[in-house]
Amino acid sequence: MLEISSLIIFAGALLVASGSPGPSVAALVARVLARGYRDILPFLAALWIGELIWLSFAVLGLSAIANSFHLLFTIIKYVGVAYLLYLAWKMWHAPVDVDAETIPDTKSGVRMFIAGMTVTMGNPKIMLFYMALVPTVIDLASVSLFGWFELSVALMVVLVAVDLTWVFMASRLRHLIRSRRAMKIANRTSATVMAGAAVAIASR
């Protein structure tokens, strides 16, 4: 078992990293502002699974392998950038009379999951956190399978709390927007934020 102090330090570092606005948060907030929270769960699940994968890479000592496959992760990053730009374009041109209560189809959920995964796996900020910062906080060489489980639980608790807080705040803000003009502004603001997230990922 890991020491409680180590888990607290890890959770604290993750809280700061995940809570600070970045490409993933920007994409999440922009999506909720533009389309509501109904279809956001696949995107959230992909963000959480992606970070769990990076944590597993770090614990298993696969940082060298990750560096060796730099080209693969670069490709993933730009696929994510392209998809974010596509979403930004869709948001910019979205009609202001869209029924916010419409339940999205399964395909949209799959697309949102893929978008979330590419954003997470291609985000250099997330990669550096797990490959560079976490080894300075946790002695990864001594982490057992149960230790990995403890870290994973801490990771999920922090990420779920942080991301759902962002979703809640963005959703409440969206409910304050009623007029066609306000919806148009919200859509285009979201599109700009989404495009900004894409540029932020591409430039790192």
Image: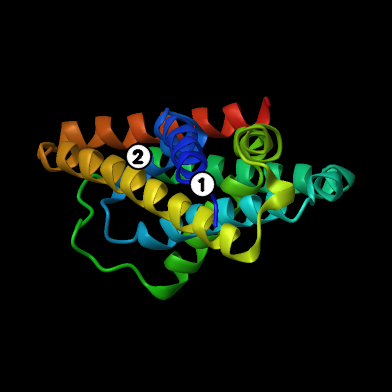
70 relative position to 139: left or right: right
Using the rendered image of the protein, determine whether residue 82 is visible from the camera's viewpoint: yes
Residue at mark 1 = 3
Where in the figure is residue 199, as x and y percent of width and height? 59, 28
Using the rendered image of the protein, determine whether residue 94 is visible from the camera's viewpoint: no
- Disc 1 marks a residue whose amino acid type is Glu
Residue closest to the eye, 128 or 90: 128
- Disc 2 marks a residue whose amino acid type is Val
Mark 2 or 1: in front is 1
Residue lying at 47% horizontally and 39% vertically, measured from the top left: 5
* Label 2: which secondary element: helix
Residue closest to the eye, 56 or 136: 136
91 relative position to 103: left or right: right
List the single residue furthest toward the right.
Answer: 68
Vertical side of 129 occupied by 60: above or below: below
| The label number, if any, that marks residue 29 in the structure image | 2
Residue lying at 27% horizontally and 42% vertically, measured from the top left: 165
Where in the figure is residue 109, as x and y percent of width and height? 43, 66
Residue lying at 27% horizontally and 54% vertically, measured from the top left: 37
Vertical side of 24 occupied by 58: above or below: below
* Label 1: which secondary element: loop
| The label number, if any, that marks residue 75 in the structure image | none
